Amino acid sequence: MSTESTTSVDRRDFLKTSVVTGIAGVAATSVANLDAASYARVKNANETINIAFLGVGGRCQQHIDVILEMQKKGLLVKPVAVCDVWDGDQALGNKKGRGLIPSAKRCGLNPDDKKQATKDYRTILDQKEVDVAVVATPDHWHAKMTIDALNAGKDVYCEKPMTRTITEAIAVVDTAQKNNRVMTVGVQSMADPTWLEAYRYIAEGKIGHVLQGQTSYYRNSLVGQWRYYPLKREMTPKTIDWDMWLGHKFKLNGEPLGPTPENMPFDRAVWAQWRCYWPFGGGMFTDLFVHQTTHLISAMGVRFPGRVVGAGGLYLEYDNRDVPDVATVVADYDEGCQLIISATMCNDTQLGEIIRGRLATIKFLGGGDYIKGFQVFGQEIKGGPAKPAQGFSAPVHQFENPKSGNATYALWENFLDCVRARKRDTLSTPELGAAAFTTVNMGVQSYRNGKVLFWDKSRRVVQEADASWATKLEARSKVRGKPNQIIGWKGGDSGSVLVPPEYQKLEGPWIDGKDPAKS
């Protein structure tokens, strides 16, 4: 057990470093007080923050709800512009109308004023009075709009996933850092204090070496995942700027954002249910997995993976979609641990969210916007073979989440506080967003191309894997207690956590017929 204690201290040092610095090259948490000269206009407590919404579909209506609620409470926020390529539908019953015209009216704006309601987001970013841009478009537009907004001097609330490709994610991080702008990624679970509390518990070495995390996102839809977004007759090429929406005339990193109208003719299903198609998103991998991945890597204290494999298939939802209905990502980390993320859209029984350490297991308790907290279960480390444990014993520690309510509202509160204070370290930074997205998008690439992938941290690119992951670890095993002698090893712990039995001293090759135990 003394060996494990030493390892826990090493792990604790690593965790402290990893969470403070985040990913390689991150400046987010180290710039709590930014150079005031970097900001032409710094909002103080008595000034109103003017907010523009880019892409006012279903999810964005919840963001508009938050801002309008804050206005009713007398908080100094104001919607000043909306953008969408669809004219929109009118509200039906208690449902809010989506699209340009209904959203403009909800925000108290004039739908005929092209500065307040437009189908071209650039018109909005050109307006100096806009302080914050909310990017809630389909995924293929996230990076372009975010980067343009950051370069225009706006702070950004970008919906998850932060981007559609990994190169876009890196570009967003670099642009946010270069412009010293405040940005948050819309993973609302990051407003839940449970994940930070779990990280602190782990960082104190209380569960020993962290070996594995697991999470899942299971649903069961009779109509098919994302087919529950309704198609409407008023969705036509006359009411939707299809050419603009596809994005083929816009480039980022030298690549067009989307296909041409010739390659992708107007289709109501592609428009309203775009998550089913690869050109516009990453299916469950990026739309759902990114939620769980973000908060779990935050709790575990890791960021970019070292090695990723994605698996799954389209096994049941044969409805003209591209993306699979069963998917799993396995990510291995240089720090010496693994993350498993799995889902199907045809069964709703969850795997559960768990972090496994050598000394204990953390089991997260389900709930609504805020989970109920977590329980910690001790490990009974056997000295010999034993059957797998059945269920959990009594918890040795429990954290009950004190928060409840609307997590999206709470994430907005934190973001706006950071905007006023000029702090980049929001609850859900672009640096964290890039790490989580890279993990799940590597799963997409692995699944689609049938390859295991490595992440090159120094070059910040994906590369095809080779045998070095396994051979590196096997070589480490041959140098007991001296892993640093293995060239290229970057593990977070040093030495073995095993306590070998006395008879293990008999181990070793017989050289020239000599018993190693007698040497």
Image: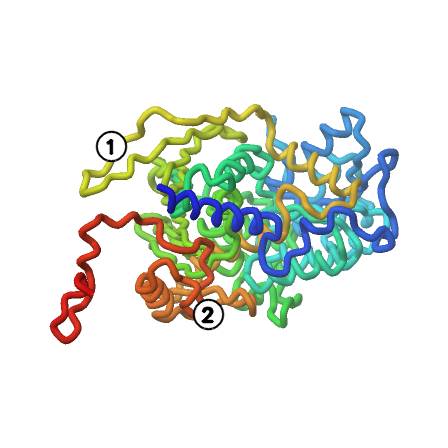
Q: Are marks 1 and 2 in contact (CB under 8 Å)?
A: no
Dot 1 or dot 2, earlier in sequence? 1
**Which residue is found at the position 24% from the left and 39% from the top?**
382
**Which residue is found at the position 39% from the left and 66% from the top?**
449
Q: Secondary structure at mark 2?
A: strand
**Which residue is found at the position 82% from the left and 46% from the top?**
113
Q: Is residue 177 left or right of residue 432?
A: right
**Which residue is nearer to you in this view: 297 or 134?**
297
Number of the front mark, 1 or 2: 1
Q: Which mark is residue 390?
A: 1
Give the residue at the far left of this rendering. 513
Where does the N terminus fall, quadrant-wise?
top left
Q: Which mark is residue 463?
A: 2
**Which residue is nearer to you in this view: 237 or 448?**
448
Measure how far apart labels 1 and 2 are at the Cα level.
Answer: 40 Å
Q: Which mark is residue 167?
A: none
